[in-house]
Structure formats: C-alpha cells, structure tokens
Image (cartoon, rainbow, N blue to C red):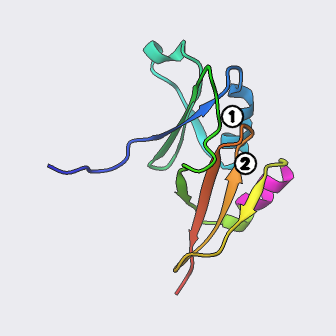
Amino acid sequence: MSILAIDHVQLAIPEGGEPLARAFYGGVLGFGEIPKPAELAGRGGAWFRSGAVQLHVGVEADFRPAVKAHPALLVDDLAAILARARAAGAEIAEDAPLPGYARAFVFDPFGNRIELMQARSA
C-alpha cells in the first residue's frame, strides 16, 4: 500500500471571490478552468488544471488566507509568471533559491501564499 500522487490541492476563498480567482489562477498563473461535478457546483468555488496539476478553490464562510501553508508549483518560466503577477498587482515575495531551484512566493487576491519553483539548468 502506498500513496501514488496528489490528486489536487484546495485553497479557500471568500464568498463571491470566484471572478478574482478566475482572473488570477487563469490569467496570471495560466491554469485552465475545468467544470466542477454537478453535485458540487452549487457550493461555489472553481476548479483549475494545468497538465496533471489540479488546483481547486472553495468558498469558506469564515475565510482566512493561508499565509504559511502553501502549494509549491513547478513552473517552466518563473520570470514570465512573476511579470504577469506584477502587472496584475499581485504581491510577490522573492526568496533565496533552494539547491537546484529559483523560487518566489506570489499571493493570490485573497492573501493565500503560493510558491513558484523553477528548476535551474545544470
């Protein structure tokens, strides 16, 4: 018995935050929106996919952003994503590289922290 993969990561958003989530996760990070199953659609939120990576945002009544816990997304053009994030007015926190990776943190419109990592070529 073993864990095979992560199916998706979910972040919370406040009620009515779907348009901002679509602009950020779709426009800034480049995710495509995917339909939620009919039985979950009435709960609000939105689901996104890029390749094999799924990110779900769900409405939370007593919303508080995740400022320490975060997903770390591997990207192929960190500079381009950070440029789009800056153009959209997103908060960015540059951080020291990790061995083999350039990285930065970007905050979604609700204050959730997301780590972006790009492998450095050898």
Residue 5 is inside the magenta segment? no
Separation of marks 2 and 1 at Cα, in angstroms: 10 Å
Q: Where residue 9 is drawn, which disc sits there?
A: none
Q: Nearer the viewer, residue 66 or 28?
A: 66
| Residue 22 position (above or below residue 118) | above
Residue 51 location (% of width, % of height): 49, 50
User: How many neighbours does mark 1 have within 10 angstroms: few (below 14), some (14-19), or many (20 or more)?
Assistant: many
Residue at image coords 61%, 19%: 61
SS for callout 1: helix
In this view, the residue in front, 60 or 79, is 60
Residue 22, position as x, y percentages in the image: 69, 34
Residue that numbered label 1 is attached to = 21
Residue at x-position 53% and y-position 56%: 72
Identify the secondary structure beneath mark 2: helix
Dot 2 or dot 1: first in sequence order is 1
Give the magenta part as a residue range.
81-87
The residue that mark 2 highlights is: 28
Name the residue type under label 1.
Ala
Q: Which residue is at 79% across, 60% downward?
A: 83
Q: Quadrant of residue 16?
A: top right
Q: Residue furthest left?
A: 1
